[in-house]
Image (cartoon, rainbow, N blue to C red):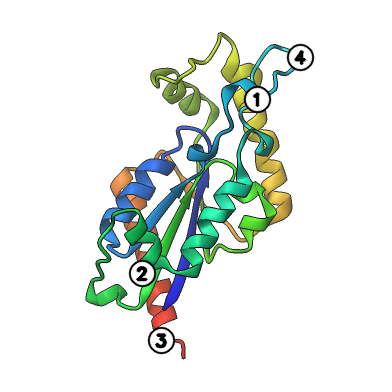
Amino acid sequence: MKRLIVGIGGVTNGGKSTLSQSLHQLIPSSCIITQDSYFKDDSVVPVDSNGFKQYDTINALHMDKMMTTVDSWRTDPDSFLRQRGRNVERSPKDAGISVLLVEGFLIFNYRPLIDLFDKRYFLEIPYDVCKRRRSSRVYNPPDPPGFFDGYVWPMYLKNRREMEGITSEITFLDGQKPKEELLAAVYEDVCQEIDRLREKN
């Protein structure tokens, strides 16, 4: 069985989850692993000099556990799905191909994970759009006053610079475009990769 691993990264509130879930609906053989599921307990996340919890760092995440999950899928995608109560469904188009969608804000900042991706997409939006979207979301725990300007956005810029220093093979997407347009473009690209894999001996 051939495997395709797709990374969907990006800025907070850029549309990563929406795009990942929509792709998953279109690709029956796909599975999603979400980086947000691997945050460490809030009690062990350190605080910076401004009193802000340092959530936007690799050290705030159980990346070893995330890699174990990814490796489990790579070993046997069908068994991985069955263990999670999923029926293994394949359309004629993706028969013989298993697709893993890995979604998260720092997936391209972790070297052991980067090289596994066959396709890499990064959703970006401007500062003002990001701040507006972030302010409309409810977080647990909630963002403290000044958190976006004092921590979230500066860390995004820092992490993005780091990411661009690690790999250049990323397709950047405008997160302000209509969701349907973004989905159509990425789905077409992924389908082309599936076709390429099928044709390989």
Identify residue for label 4: 49
> Is disc 2 placed on a helix, strand or loop?
helix
Mark 1 packing: few (<14 Cα in 10 Å), some, or many (20+)? some
The type of residue carrying mark 3 is Glu
**138 in relation to 195, above or below:** above
The type of residue carrying mark 1 is Val
- Quadrant for the N terminus, please: bottom left
Picture residue at 63% right of the left edge, 63% below the top? 115
Camera-near label (1 vs 3) is: 1
Camera-near label (1 vs 2) is: 1
Asked if marks 1 and 3 touch (Cβ < 8 Å), the reply is: no
Camera-near label (4 vs 3) is: 4
Identify residue for label 1: 45
Chain-order first, disc 1 or disc 2 = 1
Identify residue for label 2: 191
> Is disc 1 placed on a helix, strand or loop?
loop
Picture residue at 32% right of the left edge, 65% below the top? 29
Identify residue for label 3: 199
Picture quarter containing residue 114?
bottom right
Chain-order first, disc 1 or disc 3 = 1
The type of residue carrying mark 2 is Cys
Instruction: Count numbered badges in the picture.
Output: 4
- Residue farthest to the top, as pictured: 145
